[in-house]
Image: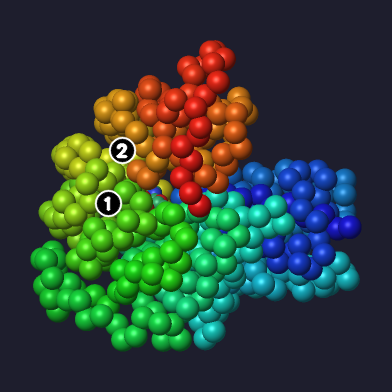
Amino acid sequence: MTRFVVVTFGCQMNEHDSERMAEVLRDAGYERTDRPSAADIVIVNTCSVRDKAEQKLLSELGRLSKLKRTRPDLALVVAGCVAQQHGKRLLARVPALDLVVGPDHIAELPELLRQIELGGPPQAHTGFDLDEPRFLSARPGRAGAAPSAYVTVMKGCNERCSFCIVPHTRGPERYRPSREIVDEVARLVSAGTREITLLGQTVNSYVDPGAGQLGAASAEPASGWRHHPPSQARRDQSQFAELLRLIAREVPGLWRLRYASPHPRYLTAPLIVAHAELPVLARHVHLPVQSGSDRVLRRMIRRHSVAEYLERTDALRAAVADLSLSTDIIVGFPGETRADFQKTLRLVERVGFTGLFGFKYSPRPCTPALRLGDDVAEEEKSARLAELFGLVESLRQKHLGQCVGTTQLVLVEGRGRNGRYTGRTERNEIVHFDADEPLAGQIVPVTIVRAFKNSLDAELPGSPRRGQSTPRHALPVLPC
Ligand code: 5AD
C-alpha cells in the first residue's frame, strides 16, 4: 500500500488542514505513517507567517530533495501557505518537487497524486475557491473521537494588518453555513468529543452565508469604538455570538466550547453577553493585541486603540468571573521605539495575560508594512522579546500560584510519557495528576497542589499522595 506522511509547520489552522489531508488520502486508499523515511509520499504543510517558518521549510525541502536522490519514486508535495504564496515559482526553485497545493485544494490531493504516479509533470494548484468555498469536515477516526477537536467556521481574512501575509495566502473571508457547522459539532460530540475549538483567521467576524440558520445579520452597531470616525469603521455585521448560541442550544452534549483566533474589533457586546450566559464557553480567550502603543497599532492597521482593547477585555472580565486572557505580541515593528515597547509591557501587566505568544517582527512579501522598512536592530528585537517573556513568566507564576488549593474541572487528554494524566482546565491551564482508572476524555474535578513553571500539579480528591498505596474512594467523575 502507498504510504504518506504529513509534516506540519505552523498554526492550528495548519494542523487542522493536515488532518483533513490525511483523511482525504486514507479514504483514497493511502496509508499514513509518521516517518518520512518510511513514506512514498511526503507532504510538507507550510506556514509563511514569519520568515523563520519559511526558512525551516526550505531546509526541510533540502533534506527531502537529498532523500529523493536515493529514492526517485518518492513524491514530494508542498501544501499550505508557502505553497499558496509561491505557487509555480516553488517548482522552479526546488526541482525535486512534484506538487504544490494551496489550502483550498486539499480535496483534490488523491487525484493530483494519481497523475504524478502515472508519470505526469509537476503541478501547482493555488486558486482560491471563491465561488463555492469548500470546508472539509473532520471525521472521527476508528478509535473514536479525540477529547478535543477543531471545527472550521470561516477561512481567509478581510483585515489588512500591515505586517500580515495571511490575506495574501488564505484569500478573502469565506464563511461556512451555520447548519454545516452545527452538524459537524454534533457528529463529533456523539462520537465522544468533549471540547470543540471553532477555527477561523478572525473567527469572530463570522457571518452566516445564508444557507444556515441564523437569519438576517444582526445590525449591531460598532458602538464604543472611537478609534476611527464612524465613516471609516466597518459596520459590525458579525454573527459569531448567534453561532455560539446555536451550537450551545443544538448540541447540549458538548462540554466545552472555545474559539481561535478572535480579532478585538469583533469582541462585540453580544459576544460578551454570550460569554456571560453560555456555561459551555470556556473561561479563557486568546485575543491578539500585537502592541500596547496606539502609534504602533495605527501603523499596524489594527483599527482599534489600546483603550478600546481594554474597554472590551474589562467588559468581558466583568461578565465572566475569573476569565483568563492570552495574546499575541509583535516586538520590533518598524518605528517601534523603546517608549512604544514600554507601553506594550504596561498593557501586558495591566491585562495580566496568563499566556503570550511573542514574535520578532519579520518583514513579509506582499504586506503594506514592507514600505516602512525594518529599522529595529535584531539584537534590540531579541532584547525586547526576552523582556516581554520575563514579564509574562512572572505574571504566569503569580497566576499559577493563586490556583494552588483550588478545585478545577479538568478535561483529561491522556497520559504523558511519565504515565501521569494531562488535561486542561476551563481557563486553559495545563494540569498533571496521577490516577489508575481510564480517564481520557472525562472531565474530572482535581485539587491543585503545586504550581510548576508552566503547568499545575494536581490530585484527584480522595486520592493518596504519590508514593502511598492506600486505596482511593470512588472517583468523582462527572456524568457524560
Ligand atoms: N512578523 C512577526 N510576527 C507576525 N505575526 C503575523 N505576521 C507577523 C510578522 N510579519 C504574528 C502575529 C499573529 C501571529 C499568528 O503571528 O502576532 O497574531
The residue at the point 70 percent across, 46 percent down is 62
The image position of residue 467, as x and y in percent, is 54, 13
Is 181 on the left-hand or right-hand side of 290? right
The image position of residue 103, as x and y in percent, is 58, 67
Mark 1 CB in 8 Å range of ligand 1?
no
Q: Quadrant of residue 351?
A: top left
Circle 1 packing at 10 Å, graded few (<14), some (14-19), many (20+), is: many
Q: Quadrant of residue 228?
A: bottom left
Q: Label 2's element? A: loop
Q: Label 1's element? A: loop
Front residue of 181 and 60? 181
The residue pinned by badge 1 equals: 289
Front residue of 390 and 78? 390
The image position of residue 209, as x and y in percent, is 42, 83
Quadrant of the snapshot with the N terminus = bottom right
Name the residue type under label 2. Answer: Thr
Is 214 on the left-hand or right-hand side of 438? left
The residue pinned by badge 2 equals: 354
**Residue 189 appearing in the image:** yes
Front residue of 270 and 74? 270
Which one is earlier in the sequence, the residue at label 1 or at label 2?
A: 1
Tags 1 and 2 in contact by the CB under 8 Å rule?
no
Q: Which mark is residue 106?
A: none
Point out the frontmost of discs 1 and 2: 2
The residue at the point 38 percent across, 22 percent down is 450
The residue at the point 60 percent across, 33 percent down is 437
Name the residue type under label 1. Answer: Val
